[in-house]
Image (cartoon, rainbow, N blue to C red):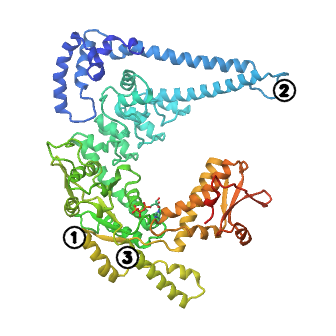
Amino acid sequence: MLLSSVPKRMLMRRSRSLSPCRALQTTGADSSCSTGRQGLREAVDANRNPIVSTSRVSRKGILSEEASSGNVTPHMQYHHLATRWLNNLQGRRSSWAALASKGRENNYWEGAGSRESRSSGFATAGVLSAAAIAFCLKKDGDSKGDSLLQAARTNSSEEVIRLLSEGADVNHRHKMGWTPLMVAAMNRQHNVVKVLLEKGADPNLGDDFSSVYEISRQKSIHSLEVLVTREDEFSSRLSSRANFRGCTALHYAVLADDLATAHTLLEAGADPLQANSQGHTAAQYAKDGPLQDLLKDWETKGAEERKKREAEERRRFPLERRLKEHIIGQEGAINTVAAAIRRKENGWYDEEHPLVFLFLGSSGIGKTELAKQVARYMHKDIKKGFIRMDMSEFQEKHEVAKFIGSPPGYVGHEEGGQLTRRLRDCPNAVVLFDEVDKAHPDVLTIMLQLFDEGRLTDGKGKTIECKDAIFIMTSNVASEDIAQHALHLRQEAQELSRRRLADNLEEVQKSSQVTISKQFKDDVIRPILKAQFRRDEFLGRINEVVYFLPFCHTELIQLISKELGFWAKKAKQRHNITLLWDGPVLDLLAGGYNVHYGARSIKHEVERCVVNQLAAAHEQELLPQGCTLRLCVATGLEQEQGGAGPTLRLEVVGEDSSTRTLDIRPPLNPDQAAYTH
Ligand SMILES: Nc1ncnc2c1ncn2[C@@H]1O[C@H](COP(=O)(O)OP(=O)(O)OP(=O)(O)O)[C@@H](O)[C@H]1O
């Protein structure tokens, strides 16, 4: 339907840049374009800027020819289309306005008593009319914002000032994603840029407009409409294929080669290091010359300031503290990893080699979690920044190809390797090699090259430099020995504390923080690792072997509190139920800890003993709306009656603090004693 309303001439022109319209080319259009193509080639050579439209020069050629031969201007070409859209919008808006004014005439929303009788129909109409007014007010706000975007494009500083004084939002976004500052920067409207910045425009906002096709798909608008809107209301100089998401006003000033505007933006706080979604800073789009020099200068200054800010942030909130917010216990592991990262961040490291850790310990005690937290710290939640490789998938010799990609001529050559593909995307990622002991020795050889030289050559012969990456291997080898040793150390330390400070509980708890002895590492761990990996040079490239110990009682209590907290939050959010628990509940649940499954066994115990009860009570409709529930341990008498070990009981707490035990019927098989520990 939309295509039918587009002038044929415009479709012919669009066929240069929009591939789906190529079929619409005509001979007439072709002849006029052949000169344009020549110009295009020259333009590509002259201007390597990757996102300014490569068809710019060819299009200019067509337009100037059309203009000189007295044909319609591009603006006139779109006129028919624009009016149709405008009429449509205007029509919708008028009908809402009419509804609103009818509501006003009939006093639908006036105060009580203004009419003797009021029917429910009137009330509905009143609500509708109020909605209509709200809609119209919003429309007015939007229309002011849209006028601001237009004024920014046409260099009407006075109009910009007027609109802002009337309440237009200085950072208003076009429905397709750009802001007035971006429009002004792209269209070299230096005065408007100054006014907008003075009025508080944010120079670091990124464009939400990705590409013509992407926006067309996202918003279900015909790609031609998107293209025409982008060209008419933003700029016609930009490629329809490139991705602009995240481009700031500074990126656009650079694309428009506007030195003065770029300078003004930088002075106003534009971040020269801010990258768009493609990971490119503004400087990467600048041609050689004064603009490039200006941006390089500011980038250097910006980088220094950023470094200072980050250092200050690190001092104020050290990495150890950040990690401890997410990881319970494992003090030794946290301290070792944080110290190594601190060395790296402050320039006290060997920049020729990446950091390599080996995390040792049994299952479910936080090895993966610590790696994830390090990635989050280094890459601020960037998904690309954490690469996880399950090394049990690389046990066979032929699976090396999956790791780095197959050589030319082999199946899967084009796909590349699982590691190399992701490392190329983020060469300074945190890479986790899970269960490294399972990998084939040939894979270990590749890893050794990676750790040693900080680079990796893929199946296509391309080398990826990754000296800034952090490599973390995990393994369960020697986990039994480590657990036994830790237990032994804890017992010794507790015995010592008990003897010295029999009644100082805090000291006794501190004794649970034990350090693995050097002798144990040399006499027990090293031989096990050597037998497993069989290569001294491989072990020699590991910067730190990090030991994860089984949880002590205090840590178990923290883990259980965290888990119950998780379910209490869910109970509140999903069912408006407040969940509380008594101290002894934690001790009872701690009994479900299994050293072989670590924190996972605690999660299962909470699900088995608490969440199952909650779900059954819910199903049996025993939970009053918005109630408060308390978890407690059954008293001795109740235990005797039940006959089994200690059990958990759910009580409803009344407003007067009285409690009522919930009588939850065991589902199906009472012999399972689902809630009995
Ligand atoms: N020390 C801890 N503090 C908080 N949560 C933990 C801790 N250890 C484990 N968990 C939780 O237990 C789950 C499993 O932990 P994780 O994946 O880190 O285990 P792992 O040591 O890597 O074990 P595996 O060798 O089996 O992969 C995660 O949900 C994690 O959040």
Image coords of residue 109 (percent x, y): 74, 26
Which one is in front, 236 or 435? 435
Read off the residue under disc 3: 481
Dot 1 falls on a residue whose secondary structure is: loop
- Marking on residue 113: 2
Which one is in front, 250 or 477? 477
Which one is in front, 275 or 165? 275
Read off the residue under disc 1: 534
Pointer 3 residue Cβ closer than 8 Å to ligand 1? no
- Of labels 3 and 2, the one closer to you: 3
Figure quadrant, ligand 1: bottom left
Q: Residue at x 26, y 43 (%)?
A: 284
Between discs 2 and 1, the one toward the N terminus: 2
Image coords of residue 423 (percent x, y): 27, 51
Image coords of residue 20 (percent x, y): 30, 21
- Amino acid type at circle 1 is Arg
Between discs 3 and 2, the one toward the N terminus: 2
Q: Residue at x 16, y 46 (%)?
A: 460
Q: Is residue 90 above or below residue 584?
A: above
Image quarter (top left, top right, bottom left or bottom right) of the C terminus: bottom right
Residue 292 at least partly seen = yes
Contact between marks 1 and 3 (CB within 8 A): the answer is no
